Image (cartoon, helix red, strand yellow):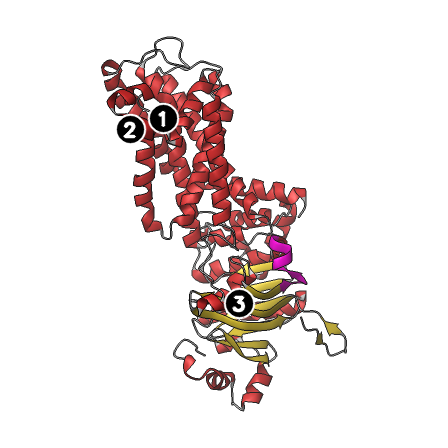
Amino acid sequence: MTFMHYVRAFRGIVWRELLRFLQQRERFFAALVRPLIWLIIFAAGFRAALGISIIPPYETYITYDVYITPGLLAMIQLFNGMQSSLSMVYDREMGSMRVLLTTPLPRWFLLVARLFAGVLVSLFQVYTFLAVAWLCGVELPAWGYLVALPALILTGMMFGALGMVLSSTIKQLENFAGIMNFVIFPMFFASSALYPLWKMREGSLILYYVCLYNPFTWAVELIRFSFYLKMNWEAFGVVGGCTVVFLALSVWAYDPSRGIQQRKAVAPAAAG
Amino acid sequence: MQKQATKDGSARTPVLSVQDVSYWYGNKHALDDVSFDVYPGKVTALLGPNGAGKTTLFSLITRLFDAPSGRIEIDGRSAADWGFKALGPLGVVFQQPTLDLDLTVKQNLRYFASLRGLKRKDADERMASALTALDMNERIGEKVRSLNGGHRRRVEIARGLLHSPKLLLLDEPTIGLDDPTRAAIVRHIHELARRDNIGVLWATHLFDEIEPDDDLIVLSKGRVVARGEAKEVVKETGAKDLGEAFRRLIGGDAGEDVAV
């Protein structure tokens, strides 16, 4: 296996994902419309009802739609990560996953390439959303659009890796809707995406801790800080750590000798 | 690994060697001490009823999961020692269709070529040649979804050959196809094995896909119950044809799964 083999395979995997994404226009519009509804309708209603005090990274009062924008970006990426996992389950059921897994390249590389392809798709969705939001009057610091890119790549990797772990546990495509309901909505609502954590604490201490231990919260904060050209090391540590753990779990799950992909093989003695 | 003597007396090294492989699903014995070799230039038919262990065997050879016991070598490289690298000389056509329906034939093949590390120009040339050989070159720009089952199978075979494999695994590739298409694919694969010196392992439960000179492995309930050239197996069992030989070999396991 030469270096160029890796490069070509990586390019091929990314290219296929992009092709599939471009052919699924409904997926693109759904990814865009969902956060726009939150931004245009939900945020407009809450703008008057909910006051946001000056908390880091903000140095002045901000409007509610500006506050929830990082959370909506993370939501786009979370949905995209789950969509990628759905596509992996679909590929497994349709058989095309076998073509990938019988490639003479290490599994971790194939999974990382697949993960990166999903991140690229999510970045395209994120920046399109930001452009529409800007047209709607939601302006973030100009340099933030560029500085936030590495943070968005990292958060996209975390959600994609989480999706991969989930895809390895889902046996049938039909079970996917349940996972969506049990993962996406609790992660989104129990986070700092819609309200600051201090506001949560005022309401319920338990809920506050739930939000605090939710990786989604830290993804939102990493994105929020990076847009204001600030580094939140705590968020970076949590998001980076979760990415590594989720990725390691998915590599383990797809390993032919150990993972949950393998149907249970039992040694003769144990088999009785 | 056993070397086989050729007509000129020289020894041939197997391109696939399966030695003492066993596999269990829980308490169920799926494969029991299975051993055989596949040689270059020959089609080796793996004949057995549904549930005999053919697909499990293919999953182990392709390393979709690892064999807990025994040894599998592809072109002299053991999957246990070489890991994913052992899959290099392998081309596979799975029983289940594996093409991306929303991509065109060309896009599907290009994707596979990139996974195998082929250069774009090289891949396009091989693609044209493999599709032409299977009468599919005119359909190269069509989405796979618009192709019928037989044409999809041809594309999968073309894809399996794109990187010039030394070993081609075919897991019941003609399932669900009409007789003329089936016959054409059988003929093509036999020609290909002879012409390009490829070792072919062809899992099937259809007798008419096996030629008298093919190597034959009869698998029943996870065990190899006969192996050798098809004509020799028929002779040894004293049967008048392969169908009768097969029924004698596997007794009540044949059921209605195996047909002419």
Q: Quadrant of residue B37?
A: bottom right
A107 over B215 or under it: above or below: above
Please state which amino acid type lies under the numbered disc 1: Leu
> For mark 2, what is the residue?
A207
Q: Position of residue A204 (x, y in %)?
A: 25, 25
Q: Which residue is mark 1?
A: A72
Quarter of the picture holding the C terminus of chain B: bottom left
Q: Mark 3 sits on what residue?
A: B185
Residue B75 position within the rendered picture, expressed as x and y whole percent measured from the top left? 67, 62
**Helix, strand, or loop for circle 2?**
helix
Check disc 3: other Cα within 10 Å, few if <14, some if 14-19, many if 20+.
many
SS for dot 1: helix
Looking at numbered disc 2 in the image, what kind of residue is underneath it?
Answer: Leu
Tell us which disc is closer to us: 3 or 2: 2
Measure the C-alpha gap from mark 3 to mark 2: 63 Å
Q: Are marks 1 and 3 on the same chain?
A: no
Residue A168's place in the image compared with A241, above or below, is: below
Q: CA distance from mark 1 to mark 3?
A: 53 Å
Which quarter of the picture shows residue B194? bottom right
Camera-nearest label, 1 or 2 = 2
Q: Position of residue B47 (x, y in %)?
A: 51, 75
